[in-house]
Image (cartoon, rainbow, N blue to C red):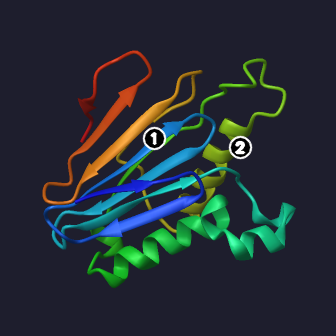
Amino acid sequence: MKHIVGVADMKTSNLAGDSIVTYSLGSCIGLAIYDPIARAGGILHYMLPDSSIDKEKARAKPYMFADTGIPRLFKESYSLGAKKNRIKVFVAGGAEILDQQGFFNIGKRNYMALKKMLFRNNVLIEKQVVGGNVNRTVRLEIATGHIYIKTSGSREARIL
């Protein structure tokens, strides 16, 4: 079954027939994690780095922010059998689509929030495709852990 992760959304699975996909990653970050032993993982599509700008919105939509969404992605994957020391991490997005002069730097700030959180928790990024000024689509196949990326104007390619 194909699960679509919308903006400010997250999906996880440990069912071999599932795939998880998120579309149109611009300045947003698509964080895909996968444990190859448990064959469990998921994708988070977050928009902003820090929930302190709107605590009420963070309570209503925790996947909108890096600091509230990332821990939930990992915890949900752990509940499906994943273990921190086995998780493979893939990151996409962080582009400057509407802000190509870098005035707001939302893409960079989103990416830095992720890197800081992962560093504090001793989690390494296996592979990343971030920055630039293109939209990206990311797909995770639960049976294999393969991650595919499609960039605007190109064909889908396996990354991991």
What mark, if any, has residue 123 been given in the picture? none
- Say whether residue 97 is left or right of residue 13: right
Placement of 132 over or under 4, stated as above or below: above
Crowding at dot 2, Cα within 10 Å, few <14 / some 14-19 / many 20+, comes out as some
- Give how far across and how far down residue 11 sits, in percent: 41, 65
- Give how far across and how far down residue 157 sits, in percent: 25, 29
Q: Secondary structure at mark 1?
A: strand
Q: Which residue is mark 1?
A: 23
- Give how far across and how far down residue 100 sits, in percent: 72, 19
Tally of numbered discs: 2
Among numbered discs 1 and 2, the one appearing first in the sequence: 1
Placement of 155 over or under 62, stated as above or below: above
Instruction: Tell me which corner region of the image, top left, top right, bottom left or bottom right, holds residue 2.
Output: bottom left
**Is 89 or 135 nearer to us in this picture?**
135
Q: Quadrant of the N terminus?
A: bottom left
Q: CA distance from mark 1 to mark 2?
A: 20 Å
Q: Residue at x 76, y 34 (%)?
A: 105
Q: Residue at x 47, y 65 (%)?
A: 122
Q: Secondary structure at mark 2?
A: helix
**Is 98 or 128 nearer to us in this picture?**
98
Amino acid type for the residue under numbered disc 1: Tyr
**Is 48 or 89 nearer to us in this picture?**
48
Q: Which residue is mark 2?
A: 109
Amino acid type for the residue under numbered disc 2: Arg
Q: Is residue 128 visible?
A: no
- Say whether residue 150 is left or right of residue 106: left
Instruction: Tell me which corner region of the image, top left, top right, bottom left or bottom right, holds residue 20.
Output: bottom left
Q: Is residue 131 visible?
A: yes
Crowding at dot 1, Cα within 10 Å, few <14 / some 14-19 / many 20+, comes out as some
- Say whether residue 24 is left or right of residue 117: left
Placement of 123 over or under 126, stated as above or below: below
